[in-house]
Image (spheres, rainbow, N blue to C red):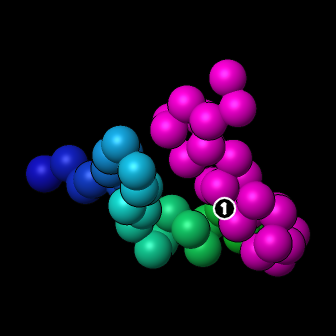
Amino acid sequence: MAKTKMIVKEDQILVDVEMIFKEIEAAGGDWKKVWEEFKAYLKDVKGEDK
């Protein structure tokens, strides 16, 4: 069965915790970088600053 990794809603992103940790590992442990990327993605989804 397929596993849901991310659900994007109008004002929030629900992310599987494994995905978050994999992203942090890929960023060399830089959790702040990953946090900023998710915040930027949510901002894009919400259509802010356009």
Amino acid of disc 1: Glu
In the picture of the structure, the residue carrying the numbered disc 1 is 23
Q: Neighbour class for label 1 at 10 Å: few (<14), some, many (≥20)?
A: some
Which quadrant would the C terminus be assigned to in this image? top right
Query: Is residue 6 toward the left or the right of residue 22 in the image?
Result: left
Q: Residue at x 55, y 30 (%)?
A: 47
In terms of depth relative to the viewer, which is nearer, 3 or 33?
33
Which residue is outermost to the left?
1
21 up-or-down from 43: above or below:
below
Query: Is residue 31 toward the left or the right of residue 50 in the image?
Result: right
Q: Where is residue 4 shown, x and y percent of the image? A: 27, 53
Q: Is residue 26 in view?
A: no
| Residue 16 is inside the magenta segment | no
Q: Where is residue 15 shown, x and y percent of the image? A: 42, 62
Query: Is residue 32 toward the left or the right of residue 4 in the image?
Result: right
Q: Residue at x 37, y 61 (%)?
A: 14
In terms of depth relative to the viewer, which is nearer, 32 or 3?
32
23 up-or-down from 30: above or below:
above
Q: Secondary structure at mark 1?
A: helix
Q: Where is residue 13 shown, x and y percent of the image? A: 42, 55
Number of numbered markers:
1
Q: Residue at x 50, y 36 (%)?
A: 45
Q: Is residue 31 in view?
A: yes
Looking at the rendering, the stretch of residues picked out in magenta corresponds to 26-50
Q: Main secondary structure of the magenta part?
A: helix
In terms of depth relative to the viewer, which is nearer, 46 or 16?
46
In terms of depth relative to the viewer, which is nearer, 9 or 17?
9
Q: Where is residue 10 shown, x and y percent of the image? A: 35, 42
| Residue 42 is inside the magenta segment | yes
